[in-house]
Each structure stands twice: as C-alpha cells, then as structure tokens.
Image: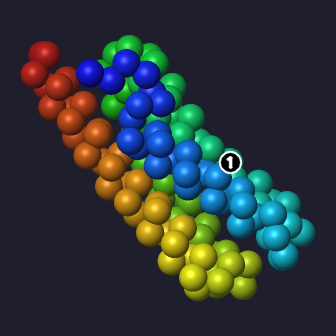
Amino acid sequence: MINRFEDLIAWQKARILTKKIYTVTKYDEFKKDFGMKDQIQRASVSIMSNIAEGFDRASNAEFHKYLVIAKGSCAEVKSQLYVSKDIGYISINSFNELKGLADELSLIIGGLRSAIQKKRDGQR
C-alpha cells in the first residue's frame, strides 16, 4: 500500500527528470534564453507537482485527472527537448538521455492512469 506520493515510482522518476532538466538549463545558450529555460523547467516541475497533488486529493477521479495533466506536461517537456536539440542548446547525447527519461516516465504515468481508471470503473 502506498501512503505517500513520494513512494510513487512515477513521482520519483519525475523528480529525477526535473533535476536533470534544471542541471542542463544552467549552461551555455540555455542560460541566456530565459523564456525557453523557464518553460521547460516549469513543465518538468508540473509533472511531479500534478502527480503529488492528484495523489493527495484522496479521490480516484481527482488522481486520474491530475495524472492526465502530468502526462500532458511530460509531452510538453519532450517537445521542448526537440526544440532545444534542434537549436543547439543541448547535445544529442543529452537529448537522448532526457527524452529517454521522459518516454519512460510517460509510460509509467500512463500505466498508473490506467490502473486508477480500472479502480474507478470497479467502484461504480
């Protein structure tokens, strides 16, 4: 039984991705592009924040809703990673690592969302 959002693998992976996003945006061109830097940082924080908020709402319907938002923010991060790579803000290696983490996280959130949906359907 999971009693805290911190125990969720999805939240743990989102935390790792967020830390890596903050690390990569400290350097070079990213540092000068406040708009792009802010947007990708905020999107990554949104993933972990929505997982936490949804979990603590103590309702399967609310948790599901917030997981949908978190998955959307994960897609936003992935899209911004493409832009970052295309304009030379991050290397192909950084892109591959970060996108791989985001892809994995998206799958985990999707699986958690499906499990919550099944739980909701069983309660009706």
- Name the residue that disc number 1 marks: 42
Res 37 quadrant in image: bottom right
Amino acid bearing label 1: Arg
Residue at 73% across, 78% down: 89
Mark 1 secondary-structure assignment: helix
Residue at 19% across, 23% down: 120
Of the 4 image quadrants, the one containing the C terminus is top left
Viewed as shown, does residue 36 lie left or right of 102?
right
Viewed as shown, does residue 104 lie left or right of 95?
left
Q: Looking at the picture, does residue 76 appear above or below residue 53?
A: below
Residue at 54% across, 68% down: 98
At which x and y percent is residue 8?
39, 35
| Label 1 Cα crowd, 10 Å radius (few <14 / some 14-19 / many 20+) | some
Q: Looking at the picture, does residue 53 appear above or below residue 95?
A: above
Q: Residue furthest right?
A: 32
At which x and y percent is residue 50?
51, 34
Residue at 75% across, 64% down: 25
